[in-house]
Image (cartoon, grey):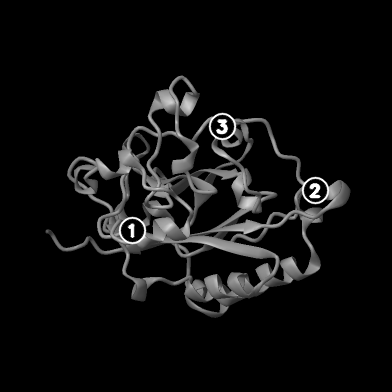
């Protein structure tokens, strides 16, 4: 099981925050996480996977330990992305996230965003394994859980990997928008957003590319300021082992992720 990195970001943590993360990881040890991890290449039958992710905000300390906000970073971009089938129906969630109705999103039929013959499917709530972990984060003053995502996908190779938008209703930018060559209206972006993709070579790999906007700190700013406002960038490429709870660390964001082998879903 992956533990929080004791490296350079560790001094930023308060003791209560560290205790909460330790409790979260112990939840996994005491539950299904005790089973043996299986490398991706162990069985040809394990070509589908359940992926579950929690994205959360972690508060920086003040004073000299306060995190410096960076200059603007490019928006997350990946050419092949898909909202898992069945995950894009809760439009009320957009209001909770503070996202105004995006005209571009209204034009997208998520059923047309298939990756060749294979589709990503939403994982039912009853099959999620990190519900208790979400509860621990919710009860802590040191963290703010943002998104709980779960989907079923094939074991794509690296060249065929499909990214999942975070949150589901966020519309990823075009290449020109991501690089700043074309205007991207910041009103249609949540405070935290990005892309996550999982692929399989000899082992499973996770690529996490997230942004945290100034709005996430609770400061009200107008559209003109949003355009100039900086973004935190969390960019991680991690080799994964199925059945293990992984913690991806960042001064302002955290990600819990677990991947399990799964059966192929029934044909539509």
Q: Which of the 4 image quarters holds residue 197?
A: top left
Residue at the spot of label 2: 66
Label 1 Cα neighbours within 10 Å, binned few <14 / some 14-19 / many ≥20: few
Name the N-terminal-most of marks 2 and 3.
2
Q: Secondary structure at mark 3?
A: helix
Query: Considering depth in this image, is 110 or 263 the residue closer to the camera?
Result: 110
Q: Position of residue 195 (x, y in %)?
A: 45, 44
Q: Nearer the viewer, mark 2 or mark 3?
A: 3
Q: CA distance from mark 1 to mark 2?
A: 35 Å
Q: Secondary structure at mark 2?
A: loop
Residue at the spot of label 1: 91
Q: CA distance from mark 2 to mark 3?
A: 23 Å
Q: Specify whether 171 is left or right of 19.
A: left
Q: Position of residue 256 (x, y in %)?
A: 54, 60
Q: Would you say residue 75 is visible in this rendering?
A: yes
Q: Which of the 4 image quarters holds residue 90?
A: bottom left
Name the N-terminal-most of marks 1 and 2.
2
The residue located at (66%, 72%) in the rendering is 140
Q: CA distance from mark 1 to mark 3?
A: 25 Å
Position of the N terminus by quadrant: bottom right
Disc number placed over residue 227 in the picture, else none: 3
Query: Considering depth in this image, is 186 or 250 the residue closer to the camera?
Result: 186
């Amino acid at each position: 099981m992956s533990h929080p990195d004791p490296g350079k970001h560790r001094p930023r943590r308060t003791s209560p925050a560290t205790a909460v993360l330790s409790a979260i990881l112990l939840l996994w040890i005491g539950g299904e996480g005790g089973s043996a991890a299986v490398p991706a290449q162990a069985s040809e039958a394990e070509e589908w996977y359940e992926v579950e992710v929690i994205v959360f905000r972690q508060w920086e300390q003040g004073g000299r330990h306060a995190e410096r906000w960076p200059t603007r970073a490019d928006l997350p971009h990946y050419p092949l992305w898909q909202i898992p089938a069945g995950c894009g129906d809760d439009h009320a969630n957009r209001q909770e996230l503070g996202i105004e109705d995006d005209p571009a999103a209204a034009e997208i039929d998520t059923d047309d965003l298939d990756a060749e013959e294979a589709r990503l499917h939403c994982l039912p709530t009853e099959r999620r394994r990190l519900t208790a972990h979400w509860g621990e984060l919710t009860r802590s003053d040191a963290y703010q859980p943002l998104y709980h995502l779960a989907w079923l996908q094939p074991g794509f190779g690296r060249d065929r990997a499909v990214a999942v938008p975070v949150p589901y209703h966020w519309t990823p930018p075009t290449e020109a928008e991501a690089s700043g060559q074309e205007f991207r209206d910041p009103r249609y972006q949540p405070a935290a957003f990005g892309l996550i993709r999982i692929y399989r070579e000899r082992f499973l790999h996770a690529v996490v590319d997230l942004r945290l906007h100034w709005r996430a700190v609770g400061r009200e700013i107008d559209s003109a300021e949003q355009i100039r406002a900086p973004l935190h960038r969390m960019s991680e490429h991690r080799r994964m082992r199925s059945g293990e709870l992984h913690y991806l660390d960042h001064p302002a964001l955290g990600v819990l992720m677990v991947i399990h082998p799964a059966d192929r879903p029934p044909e539509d």
